[in-house]
Image (cartoon, rainbow, N blue to C red):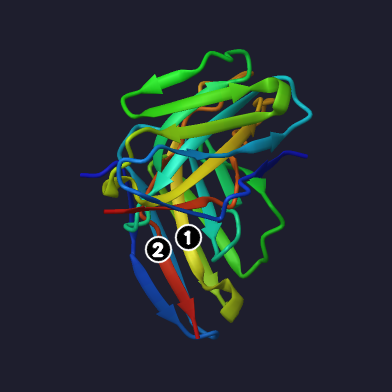
Amino acid sequence: ETGVTQTPRHLVMGMTNKKSLKCEQHLGHNAMYWYKQSAKKPLELMFVYSLEERVENNSVPSRFSPECPNSSHLFLHLHTLQPEDSALYLCASSHNKGGVLDTGELFFGEGSRLTVL
Amino acid sequence: AQKVTQAQTEISVVEKEDVTLDCVYETRDTTYYLFWYKQPPSGELVFLIRRNSFDEQNEISGRYSWNFQKSTSSFNFTITASQVVDSAVYFCALSEAYSGGGADGLTFGKGTHLIIQP
């Protein structure tokens, strides 16, 4: 099994649909992340969960709703999306030991390619 | 605020040539990490290297080498004797010191699309 698994790999949805992206990590990490990758733009950090608590929310519209039921699973619930939300959504995990200089490397999944019609 | 600039949007070279990918960063912190990731067509980002701000030693790993220069806020990546399999998008990223309360994630540059022609 790969370290970080994302499903579905591809998703097409209408603006009125509700769908969810799923991420699962098998690395024993304690932090998980959602990034958005749009064409010709830097990866944008959306949400960070550390020890299952959300610690970062970079002004993401409420139509994106994250959920982290345990340290191995992360969801991104989608509803009433706009065409400009079409992008590759990448999940990542890391092991953070706590304290200064705590940034470990991120392990990424292959992403979920979302198309909003 | 932190920022990472990768000025080269796309680079195309012929196989076996050496190629350098530039990365310039901005941060107000004195303690930070720098990263390089590779994104092949399959989509996932593959970790290549992490360097902390206190360690300016250059690093070599096989055909890959990294030049960290704090004086110019640069963290450049060189591939020697490039191969077609090196074709990918390469991202430079920065993380400032964790200040308690949770992880910060990484700030990425826009990436450089490297094309190695046979």
Position of residue A86 measured from the top left corner of the image (x, y, whole percent): 52, 73
Residue drawn 65% across and 26% down? B98
Task: Answer above or below: position of B111 versus B53.
Answer: below
Mark 2 near mark 1, Cβ–Cβ under 8 Å? yes
Which residue is labeled 1 in the image?
A: A89
Amino acid beneath label 1: Tyr
Task: Answer above or below: position of A27 versus A111.
Answer: above
How far apart in space, not on screen, are marks 2 and 1 (Cα)? 5 Å
Q: Residues within 10 Å of mark 2 (few under 14, many from 20)?
A: many
Task: Answer above or below: position of B32 versus A1.
Answer: above
Residue A86 in sight in this render: yes
Which residue is labeled 2 in the image?
A: A112
Label 1 resides on the chain identified as: A
Q: Residues within 10 Å of mark 1 (few under 14, many from 20)?
A: many
Residue drawn 41% across and 79% down? A12
Label 2 resides on the chain identified as: A
Residue drawn 66% across and 37% down? B24
